[in-house]
Amino acid sequence: MAVLQDQGRTALARAIAAQSLYLAWGRGLPAWDAVPAAEPTTAAALVDEIGRRLVTAVQYVLPNVAGEIELPDASRYTTSATPTKWLHVRWTFDFADAAGEDVRELGIFVGGTVVAGLPAGQRYFTAAQVDNPGDLYCLERIPKFTRNAGVRQVQEFVLPF
């Protein structure tokens, strides 16, 4: 049986890091508030996308119990100057992005395009401004929170390859 090698995984990480990466958030379904919904493995889109932001930072990382990057599962990573099979990606939303919206799901999209004619430098896009959503890399359904315009929302993930 063929086994994917670390060098091949690193090549995949480099290929993904070179593309446009978006974090989209969605309203999901209010029924999820009572009964959490499991994430499918076949989804191509969010249930009810609100908008998405272009990635703020992408860096290679390595697992390190004393690392400065900590995830909710208590795993820790440290940055790497050379490519690895793990990508740390971070999105820093503006205060007004989706203000007042209820968020129940997050999705990382690879590639995709937005409609033509938008202002140069725009980094947050409403669902109506997305021409081609790209490929859904991962999906997370979360307990509902309401976007507060007084909070700068930051989302970060370590993507394994």
Image (cartoon, rainbow, N blue to C red):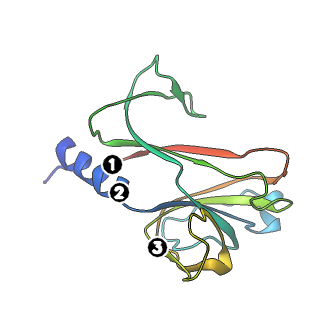
Ranked by sequence position, the earlier of labels 3 and 1 is 3
Residue under label 3:
112
- The numbered dot on residue 161 is 1
Q: Is residue 38 visible?
A: no
Q: Is residue 18 above or below residue 86?
A: below
Which of the two discs, 3 and 1, sits closer to the camera? 3
Snapshot quadrant of residue 121: bottom right
Q: Name the side, left or right, on which 159 lies relative to 141.
A: left
Place of residue 85 in the rendered image (x, y in percent of width and height, measured from the top left):
30, 42
Place of residue 73 in the rendered image (x, y in percent of width and height, measured from the top left):
57, 33
**Number of marks in the rendered image:** 3
Q: Secondary structure at mark 3?
A: loop
- Residue beneath the point at 58% across and 82% down: 117
Residue ranking furthest to the left: 1
- The numbered dot on residue 139 is none
Depth check: 68 or 32 in front?
A: 68
Residue under label 2:
16
Three-letter amino acid code at the position of disc 3 = Gly
- Residue beneath the point at 55% across and 65% down: 40
Q: Is residue 26 above or below residue 67?
A: below
Per the model, the C-alpha gap separating discs 3 and 2 is: 13 Å
